[in-house]
Amino acid sequence: MNIECDVLIVGTGIAGLYTALNLREDLKIILVSKSKLTDTNTYLAQGGIATAKNVDDIPFFIEDTLRAGNYKNKIEAVNVLATESIDNINKLLQLGVEFDRSCGVLLYTKEGAHSTNRIVHHKDYTGKAVADSLINKIKKKKNINVFEETVLVDLIASDNKCIGGIFTKENKQINIFSKETVLATGGIGGLFKNSTNQRTLTGDGLAVAIKNGVRVKDLGYIQFHPTALYDNKDDRRFLISESLRGEGAILLNSKGERFVDELLPRDEVSAKIYDEIKKTNVPHVYLSVAHLNDSYVKNRFPKIYSECLKRGIDITKDYIPVAPAQHYFMGGIDVDLNSKTSMKNLYAVGEVACTGVHGDNRLASNSLLEGLVFSKRAAESINKEINSIEINIFNPKIIYDFEKAKRENINIIVEEIKKKRWDLKDELIYY
Ligand code: SIN
């Protein structure tokens, strides 16, 4: 089947949804999800969205982002991220997102390596609150067509110019031709045994980019979140948000002793936890909020409270067993400040893109913000340029075995990770 549109967006996390909402309404847009619209890492995001609180906070936010990223960040991208944060949070408020407030004033929480409280949030399910608002808006747009359960297997490209994607749905091939294509396919956590990510996230966008010679970057920069629930019954590791530590949670070893400053950058806290695990031979440490007020904990962290209770842990009384788990991919498809890749008419936004803002260790709650800031820039660039684009439609290759094609894409990423991070080979599901 062949379909045509102006803009093809692959992926329905915050970056894909927000790109669609910032595009011109006269453009015919197709938005594709590999599974359901809501099966995204955005939907799982707990802590919140970091933002400069005001103009005076911008230099401090920049410095915190650089320090957490071990100064391996791209400084121009960090400047853009911090400077455009306030406008994008305001735009979310206009789109109907409700962040927590006290007496009408926005509440900001803190997480590791932030020098001040600057994270807007909706209890402990910020990602769901944001995604639900954006999805409501998308559903009202007549120019946006959503395809679910539709898997990207390749790009349609020639002479380093992208004219769409090849997908499979119900074991049939769908070719979607587009003037501009935006990859917003998310991260690679689905390839790891222990990850907080959705299982479906296996790096499809990154794989098709590599296959087609699109420039990629920093593929060894993989972040482990310090506090995923240690529960060997779960397929995906349930996250215990860093915002608990921001609100006073403490980390304890198996003897009940504190061993680390809980608000250090993520890579440092994870390293200390691994040391403790090695020293004690116990496969986890503990996080505790038992010293905080019970009703505050239940009201501020309802999702974590109820998910832990389902597993027999009452967080108002019990220690929570936690251990690090793969959480975020800082590398990806190399993009410029407008999210353009090295292939003509191909953009990448969100976790699949490498804007360089995170260096080798993302500052907490900067991922949703990056998704907002750089997808808006992509949409603005497309809005300006699309009228001058013409495409020559040709018959793309025919894929005879979709399972084989999907597996080949997984292998591409696995091989790249093994090349860059041999130390993580045992963490991979496929090798
Ligand atoms: C968390 O809530 O701990 C995750 C936030 C993030 O990954 O930035």
Image (tube, rainbow, N blue to C red):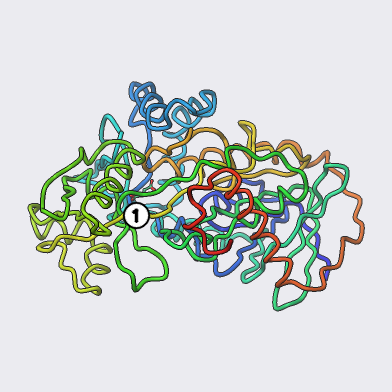
Q: Is residue 153 above or below residue 27?
A: below
Percent x, y of residue 164: 78, 54
- Say whether residue 193 is visible: yes
Percent x, y of residue 361: 43, 37
The residue at the point 74 percent across, 71 percent down is: 402
- Say whether residue 375 is visible: no
The residue at the point 55 percent across, 49 percent down is: 15
Q: Is mark 1 within 8 Å of ligand 1?
A: yes
Q: Position of 339 compared to 266: left or right?
A: right
On the image, numbered disc 1 is attached to which residue?
Answer: 46
Within the image, what quadrant is residue 240 found in? bottom left
Percent x, y of residue 33: 61, 64
The residue at the point 63 percent across, 34 percent down is: 338
Q: Nearer the viewer, residue 387 or 194?
A: 194
Percent x, y of residue 13: 52, 55
Instruction: Assign the N terminus to one quadrant of the image.
Output: bottom right
Q: Position of 416 compared to 42: left or right?
A: right
Q: Is residue 52 above or below residue 323?
A: above
